Amino acid sequence: MRIVVAGGDGFCGWPTALYLSKQGHEVTIVDNLSRRKIDDELRSNSVTPIASLEDRVAKWKEVTGKEIRTFIGDLNHYDFLSEVFRQTEPEAFVHFAEQRSAPYSMMDREHAVYTQSNNVIGNLNVLYAIKEFAPECHLIKLGTMGEYGTPNIDIEEGYIEIEHKGRKDLLPYPKQPGSFYHLSKVHDSHNIMFACKIWGVRATDLNQGIVYGLHTEETQLDPLLVNRVDYDEVYGTALNRFANQAAIGHDITVYGSGGQTRAFLNIEDTVRCVEIAAENPADRGEFRVFNQFTEWFSVKDLAERVQQVAKEEGLDAQVKQIENPRIENEDHYYHAVNTKLKDLGLEPRLLTDEVIRDILKTSIQYQDRIIKENVLPSITWK
Amino acid sequence: MRIVVAGGDGFCGWPTALYLSKQGHEVTIVDNLSRRKIDDELRSNSVTPIASLEDRVAKWKEVTGKEIRTFIGDLNHYDFLSEVFRQTEPEAFVHFAEQRSAPYSMMDREHAVYTQSNNVIGNLNVLYAIKEFAPECHLIKLGTMGEYGTPNIDIEEGYIEIEHKGRKDLLPYPKQPGSFYHLSKVHDSHNIMFACKIWGVRATDLNQGIVYGLHTEETQLDPLLVNRVDYDEVYGTALNRFANQAAIGHDITVYGSGGQTRAFLNIEDTVRCVEIAAENPADRGEFRVFNQFTEWFSVKDLAERVQQVAKEEGLDAQVKQIENPRIENEDHYYHAVNTKLKDLGLEPRLLTDEVIRDILKTSIQYQDRIIKENVLPSITWK
């Protein structure tokens, strides 16, 4: 299958591109390299030293014989995007190419505006490009479980049947996102649903949980293929960030009580979920929503699991509650459905101590690269 | 009260600014005059010849002795918007300043991108400006009943209590907007709800129905104060457009079967609703949604009412079904709640033949100004 992976230089996109290439798909990466530029802006970095995209794909070809084409450019530039569609004629367009950090979107007005404009308009361009150049192309769009927020009822996969005053309808699940970033994904979902309805676009919205882990079988084939790992307050997410804190002897910092419950999955399941979506395309006009996660944890429980594994590795890390920079419920109901991907063949890899140990070991290996000032939160929602 | 009316040069904004000024409020109009520029772009016009904003407010002062300040500029320019906030210190910010035509947003990609970017980012800037310069200021934001679409259950005012799998929550009402314009309003609503939650912004989202009529007591004080009336396929809306068609001897054109049911209100109720919202501000942190309409009609029923009144005026207009350029249900359930504004004192003026006659007469008076090629739809949703 001809597959474009937009955002294919990023944390989820890169291993996905490699995995799909390995399966024999004709993969093209589109990326504006913005994640690398934001590292410069934030004076941050990946724990692992990552090669340039050019070197990465050259190494991939050397190791596997498989070619990955690359286009460096921005989805917000429609002429560029049009050229990508004309040259690649994609059958599936996997769209990871959005600013994906909630704290980044909350830094100030300009970062909020950038996030919403970049994500919403970029995605709108993709919809128009599919309509114009590849109407059969299946859009596989990365959403987030954070679109739902933490309602006091079970979270369904995109839609909910509502009975109200004696009548019934199946309606889009109400969204309560918790940052300008999460809001941008909600806006995207609404735009995509509409494009499916009016133009017959095929779309799958993957409402992904928080991704942990870093290696996949493919990224481990050569050091030049290594995936990036974020540990800082802006792009580092729970679990990966905790492991990095433990590795450098820092407290494992939990925001507030740590009672916040979130959905998680392993990066190796991310790549598999995208493959499943691609192999089972949505129908023409169908807007399909899959909740892409395998388990949920409270942040505090996760912190304690990391602490335990760190202890076994001889690292004495304490779990410490710090003031929550976000406005969010720390004590809430959480129950989310995630059967659709499993019905299509996903076999979840649940979180094991081995996975935590693996992240820890990578962090220890590269601990000299970690910039300690970047670990603690300074961006607040207030 | 110090009130900013953003979009105060437009069809709803102008009569609202006059009405609030008459009530003794200190009114400032902010407008980028985009609606006038779009007339140039579309080679369209208002049926009524409208004066420049400068002449309008000068005449208003001459007639009433009341001053309305004006700022010409764009909400998307934050430096400009900051200056408006610094100079006016608003207690209420009435936000009409968005691209408000569904067909305009559906013309092509660039118009869709313009509409979403202009509306969503402009509104995001307003939220930041309130946070930065006037945290007590009450945002009165014009939304649309079109945000809800046509669900098969009753439409509530912004929120709905959902019982699901034995649990309950009061959640944002699911939205199914029908154009990139309507989507922009949904995006706005989500952004505002979040700003209320994290910054304690006071906000009222007025989900307005389709506005008909043109004159208010204030706009009739002098010909220079007349309101604009749109009749073209892009900005003309049902009822006003029908009356204009009848006035020039054109068929009254209904899209498809005309079974589409929509909520409506008189422009004189629009101005009153905004006053009610301003006089009863939302609490700090409250995101309040009012459904701002007084009755609903099927498009076909409306067309027939206009036909009847036209006949009484000696005009022989036929109701004609033409191919629907939109993708929408033409036969659907419709029942929407609108009690909140009435509970606060709105006394609805229901649609009378007199109102239709009034629009008809204005159209006849200015029929030479009507550009006939602009009446029929050419923009499709497909």
Image (tube, coloured by chain):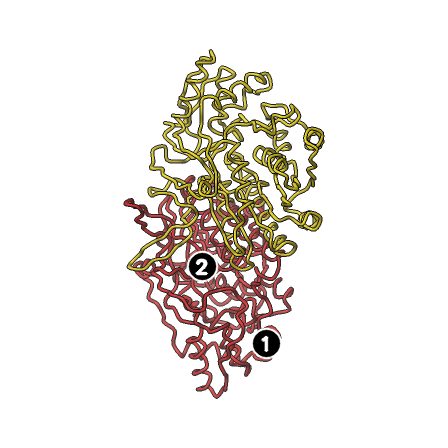
Chain colours: A yellow, B red
Q: Which mark is residue B370?
A: 1
With B172 as the anchor, is A283 left or right in this view?
right
Instruction: Check chain identity for marks 2 and 1: say if they share one.
Output: yes
Residue at 51% across, 23% down? A375
Does residue B225 appear anywhere in the picture? no
Q: In this view, does A205 lie above or below B37?
A: above
| Sequence-earlier tag: 2 or 1 | 2
What residue is disc 2 on?
A: B144
Dot 1 lies on which element? loop
Circle 2: residue type: Thr
Q: Look at the numbered discs 2 and 1 and tell me whether their residues touch, using CB distance below 8 Å.
A: no
Residue under the image location 49 percent in, 77 percent down: B243
Indicate left or right for A32 with B254 as reference: right
Of the numbered discs in the image, which one, if any, rests on residue A301? none
Residue A208 at least partly seen: yes
The image shows residue B75, relative to residue A354, as above or below, that is below
**How many discs mark residues in the rendered view?**
2
Label 2 sits on a secondary structure element that is strand
Q: Is residue B168 above or below residue A249?
A: below
- Residue B339 spot, x, y in % from top left: 31, 60
Which quadrant is home to the C terminus of chain B? bottom right
Dot 1 amino acid type: Ile
